Image: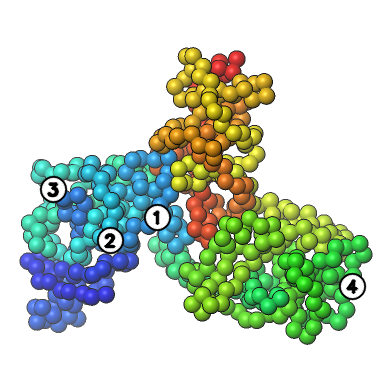
Amino acid sequence: MTKKTLKQDAGTVLVEEPVLNQRAPNQQLDKASAADRGGSASTTQQDTQQVTQQFVTFLSGNEVFAADMTPVREIIRVPQVVRVPLAPAALEGLANLRGKVLPIISLRRLFGFPEQSHDDSTRALVVDVGQPLGFVVDRVSSVVGVDASHIEDVGSISTTVNAEVLSGLLKDVGGHPMIMMLDFAKLIEKEFAQIASLSKNARGTNAAEAAAKVEEEDSSDELQLVSFDVDGQEYAIAIEEVQEIVQVPETVAHVPHSDAHVLGVMTLRNRLLPLVNLRSMFGLPHRDLDEKSRIVVLTLQGVSVGVVVDAVSEVLRVAKSGVDALPALLASEGNLAEITSICRLDNGKRLVSIVTARNLFGHSVIKEALSAVSQSEDGSDLAAKVDDALDDDEQVVIFRLDKEEFGAPIASVQEIVRVPEALVRVPLSPPFVEGVINLRGSVLPVIDLRLRLGLEPAERTDRQRIMVFLISDMRTGFIVDQVAEVLKIPKAAIEASPQLSDQQSRLLSRMANLGKQKRMVQLIDPSHLMAKKELAALARIGA
């Protein structure tokens, strides 16, 4: 990064090219100012801090703005976003920033400036107003230290933006006669009431806890994996999922009438440990166990199982950026369900398949091995315990509207049917109803979910489907662009969506942030798809 210091009337301007991932400003501005005056940086620093304040200046539309650097956490390129229906128009969408959901807001839209496509200069200021928000600006100019004498009140000055969201004016700074000081907290309070209420509640968070959370996020950019070999192919599993690694005992007790994949049971610290052969589970050729063979002991909800592998290689520490989700075409194959992602090492020359313990426990072979030793010392049903633990997953039907993915609880979906060539229009029916179809002798009202969520209408295609929901005992069909899959989502990956509007916060109150797959799925609550009055109108149509 190159830095260039320019002397200005209001202080020292630090221009950084490019200004990316800019954290809280350091002391370089103060030292540079002292050096320019021929004084001592150490003796002048305290005085400088008392009379100067640091701002980031940026352009939006044809206007130049400045914002206090204190709440600015970083400056990033505009990330890819997931668009949110029923949200305020100024919201471009939601982005995944290091595993956290970040709302991205367009300043151009907020101020009513003409739309403009993003280019190489476009940036997002990540500002903490109680919760992090990304504000899209046309270009970041500089970070500037400003003397207090050059900061004035807004007063009655006429501006192109609402003066209520300004905190003051900078005079003769950075070559500009006047720069408007934007107050992001006021801006959010005025334009995003839902976010503002959350932000106020969040401001009471303990600063030490917040700092610890940031430190934890920064340290989670790496994965620690135990790598092992099966039939010449390298696999790995997260080290936190491995209880221990032991040698294969001289004798393994065979379990009568068990599947060939189940090797038997062994005693490990006075408890029975069922053993399964990963070669058999993956459909690989049989090989006798030898001195290199090892047992990787995995545990879920206090239930343990031993997975036999050809050899254990090493403990890997890899960057998350080098881990990719398994391609969808391969992930759909049943025998690859346990493999969730691929790790690229040595510039892509070495590929390691990452196995998830949770998926392994869901395999029928593991459950059979656990059933074989269910009557353990405490008489507990080990397979039932695992089933209870796996119930933490939430099963949803994934469907698409335009480019975005949505999910509905599988229990709420009555059925999925094709869209007929023509829908029958019922006279005097509500405008939101596209028509009706005859579904096994019953009249089914059909609604275009695109229009329901305020999205642009689309032409009918062969991929479109009607998802039938039961809402307050009323069967209603909603047209979606495509039904993609049925997906099990760990509850740990489901979080509350940012509350952007009343409708959105009720209908799309949750989302699944699947970081490894680089997917964000908005979870819909079908019970809020229709209002009571609308349900009454649908009941009349059905009658």
Which residue is depicted at the point 49% across and 31% down?
448
Residue at image point 72% right, 52% down: 388
Report the amino acid beneath label 1. Answer: Gln
Which residue is labeled 1 in the image? 80
Q: From what the image shows, is residue 4 above or below residue 495?
A: below
Where in the figure is residue 66, as x and y percent of width and height?
A: 19, 56
**Front disc: 3 or 2:** 2
Q: CA distance from mark 4 to mark 1?
A: 54 Å
Q: How many marks?
A: 4
Pick whichever of labels 2 and 1 is earlier in the sequence.
1
Type of amino acid at the residue the image marks with label 4:
Ala
Q: Earlier in the sequence, mark 3 or mark 1?
A: 1
What is the residue that sits farthest to the right in this orientation? Answer: 256
For the question of whether residue 524 can be seen, the reply is no
Dots 2 and 1: beta carbons under 8 Å? no
Which of the two discs, 3 and 2, labels the residue nearer the N terminus? 2
Query: Mark 2 vs mark 4: which is more N-terminal?
Result: 2
Contact check, label 4 and label 1, Cβ < 8 Å: no
Say if residue 539 shows up in the picture: yes
Q: CA distance from mark 3 to mark 1?
A: 36 Å
- Disc 4 element: loop
The residue to which callout 3 is attached is: 154
- Residue 253: which disc? 4
Disc assigned to residue 16: none
